Image (cartoon, rainbow, N blue to C red):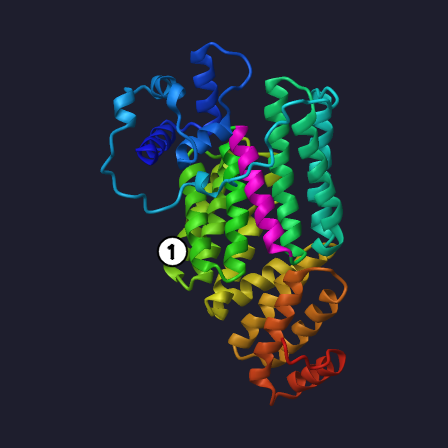
Amino acid sequence: MTNVVGANIKRLREERGWSQARLAREVCRLAGVSGEPVGRQEISRYETGKRTPREWLPLIAQALGVAVADLRTRQDHPEPALPCLSDYLPDADLLDVLSARTGRRVGAEAVDDLRKRVHALRLADDVIAGGDLVRPALRELRSAVKLYRGGVYTSEVGRALLRQIGELAQIAGWIASDAGKPEEAERIYRMGMSAASQAEDRTLVGNLAGSLAYQYSNTGRVSEGVALARAALADAGGQAPPKARALYLDRVAWAHTKAGEAQPAMRALGEASEALAEDSTGAESPSYLYWMDSGELRVMESRCYTELRRPLRAVPLLRDVLKDYDATHTREMALYLSWLAVALLDANEPEEAAAVAERVIVIAAAVSSKRTADRVRVILRRLKEFSDVPEVSSLLAEQLEVTPRNPST
């Protein structure tokens, strides 16, 4: 029966668009108690069946606007087609506040200082690869979590801290993934989703979920990538600002592309373009989406066409993107050139592809990025199909001299 109660609590909470933290606060308000005798983690335990709500059940029912009997009644609703984002929150929450908080008092100035450091880390990621940035990123994240768990602050400051931890987790997870640490990145993304959920920032939850879905898609977990990308869109996209919706749809398009599903990928790209067009109406978007623009959508469109082996569409788009691209963003330059090289091979232009591939190899050697290293391997593997072309055979021979044969790779 406990599992039935937990499932009903979760269903009714989500129907109201409430986070677990919001339900916990409503229960405490109805109980007339200060502090948090029932917190987000307690609600999570009720919903997963790890704990029975017993004395709190009447107040939970009152908060949700139903009778206690309704919570104990099995509902014959079909399972949702997509997972909910709350399914991805970590079981053991690293954000539990310490019972005895002896840290310094935290005010709005400390939160603003953290916000500036988080944004500085985003800007650094534009020009520094993950392998060189992962240590300072994780150090910042540990420091922020320690501040939240042990500091003394108001509930408003606490929510602001959680929001910044969520933003920091998104960029730190992205950096860890680029550094070749996908397990660490997933743990960070999930913690960030928990922080954003407790802060009741659904737009940020969707951004974190989309980032994790992107990692799934790129590491062979394609069906999970599709499910999570679509869940992010379904759970967070309805009321999200235009740029955020465009980003969710961007992730959906890539997930379907990696799954080899061309039609839903192209449909998502079209909807992303429509969402981004709404941004001109003056709707405010979070500052962390500064990079999401029409150029980014062109990049994703060209990548999707490349992966789907449609070079006649991919090559012109990639050439247009690269024509005026900022050369200081060396990792992205290498990545975009790598897709151009592959698209040229699909277009049966091996000579030009070899020239582009050489540029990718030179740039990739100078950046500590797992993604660029993986793309170099993809290009070299594809070039072997044209080994009878002099320009290609020459490049392959050079690479064989630089990189000794390794039977394990």
- Residue that protrudes farthest toward the left in the picture: 76
Q: Nearer the viewer, residue 357 or 315?
A: 357
> Was residue 183 drawn as part of the magenta stretch in this picture?
yes
Is residue 134 visible from the viewing direction of this image? yes
Which residue type carries mark 1? Answer: Pro
Q: Is residue 125 left or right of residue 242?
A: right
Q: Quadrant of the C terminus?
A: bottom right
Per the image, the residue denoted by label 1 is 264
Q: Nearer the viewer, residue 55 or 151?
A: 55
> Was residue 308 drawn as part of the magenta stretch in this picture?
no
- Image location of residue 264, percent across then percent down: 38, 56
- Image location of residue 404, percent across then percent down: 73, 81
What is the crowding at mark 1: few (fewer than 14 residues within 10 Å), some, or many (at least 20)?
some
- Image location of residue 70, percent across then percent down: 26, 25
In the image, residue 53 above or below residue 404: above
Q: Find the magenta span and give its range.
A: 181-199
- Image location of residue 317, percent across then percent down: 54, 61
What residue appears at the point 64 percent right and 44 percent down from the top-left corner? 171
Q: Nearer the viewer, residue 69 or 367?
A: 69
Q: Quadrant of residue 120?
A: top right
In the image, residue 102 above or below residue 303: above
